[in-house]
Amino acid sequence: MSARRVVVTGLGAVSPLSATARTTWQRVVRGDCAIGMLPELHRYEEVGIPTKLAATVPRVQDADSSNGSADDDALVRFDAPAVQARHGRRTLPDSILYALSAADEAIADAGLADALQQNSSSSSNDNRQVNGARAGVAVGTGISGLQDLIAAHETLHTRGYRRVSPYLIPNSLVNMAAGLISIDYGLRGPNHAVSTACATGAHAIGDAYRFIKYGDADVMVCGGADACIMPVVVAGFARAKALATGFDDAPEESSRPFDRRRSGFVIGEGAALFVLEELEHARARGAHIYAEVRGYGLSGDAHHVTAPHESGDGAYRAMRAALDSAGVDARVLDHINAHATSTPLGDGIECRAIKALLAGTAAQPTITATKGATGHLLGAAGSLEAMFAVMSIHAGVVPPTLNLHEPLEEAEGLHLVANTAQQQSINFALSNSFGFGGTNVSLLFSKPDA
């Protein structure tokens, strides 16, 4: 079978900026920042954790919180009970709830909700129908189920074996978000989960792209979700010297990708999911197409558990592989959504890798890093930032890199979009995601007719 073309027809998100994809996009372009103080800060302070910052999902019950004005039309708050009721489920971890909500939005955005719910087992040739056996899911998470496991451990030792939930293990599994989306929408094609640290969401999209490209499915729901803002996780990242400190009086200034004053990342949470579809399948049902997935590149550093190789070789090879898989050269690039987490080491290394990729070309792609607005969503970061790359193509605008006032030395000569969104016609855009363990992934998107 010849390789098939794959397009993006649906987007859904739950992010620290807002609980829908549309409003998350509005706020990131506007230059809003979702970073504030850790919830229940005393729990962190009493054990000496040095950071006080986080980017949490705005919730209905926290309408007085500081990550958005109560009368802001672009701020939608997450309603966990409504998601549970919609899916007929009781207690689920936040990461799964975020994934379910993002899946609902992406599937509805693609115009597939009725088809998947009512016709998932149909083999009809009616173009409005979707064959559930040809529709699948690829959704992963970086750190899954820790909060439930910690609570269950306490329950076991204080209240006994019979008080431990029978859903503890299923709800703690990396693949359970994918499993529930599959069950609730009758997706009987590939049922896949990925866990590659902060590259998870991007790998899930790339794998789903290949499932469609090589004929395993016609439709895939894919992306990443994560929710692990709790003392033990924050303590672990703090001990690894990965987190931002020193901005307690100005949390919105703490995440500053590519800036000389960067000190580390700010932990975030959320989910971002795509609906990917084979091009002719999408056209046959008159689907709206945001962009085309053109390339997928992967590499490994084989260097260190948390630090990338100083040369940037792994990041370079992932970007190069994404371009090679699409049969295009770096000179076509108009835009790059960088992984840049605001860490002292990683941002400069990514700059070196990008310079190596562009060497010998006249290309001057705009480069942005949106973690200044959202914090670092860990396993959901790659899919959220891929969504921003897709929307940049679709809407012709690049979101800003917040708090970028003094670019680091390694960024000299690169076109960084600082502090204010930039209008731009974009044909090709890369989205980079890198993770602990030395895992690297780049996704290449284009306008459908590019």
Image (cartoon, rainbow, N blue to C red):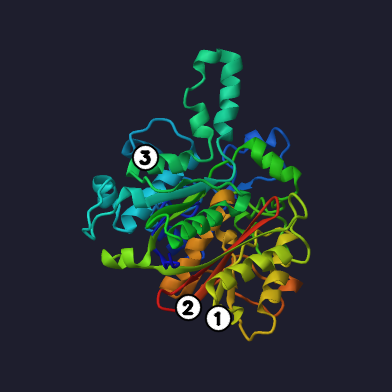
List the residue tagged with mark 3: 183
Q: Which quadrant of the view contains residue 313?
A: bottom right
What amino acid is found at the position of numbered circle 3 in the picture?
Ile
**Neighbour class for label 1 at 10 Å: few (<14), some, many (≥20)?**
some
* Residue 3 percent coordinates (x, y): 45, 67
Q: Is residue 389 above or below residue 248?
A: below
C-alpha separation, residue under disc 1 versus residue under disc 2: 8 Å
Residue 427 got which mark? 2
Picture residue at 24% right of the left edge, 61% below the top: 127
List the residue tagged with mark 1: 332
* Residue 398 percent coordinates (x, y): 51, 72
Q: Which quadrant of the view contains residue 393?
A: bottom left
C-alpha separation, residue under disc 2 versus residue under disc 3: 36 Å
State yes or no: discs 2 and 3 in contact (Cβ < 8 Å). no
Mark in front: 2 vs 3: 3
> Under tag 2, what secondary structure?
loop
343 or 333: nearer the viewer: 333
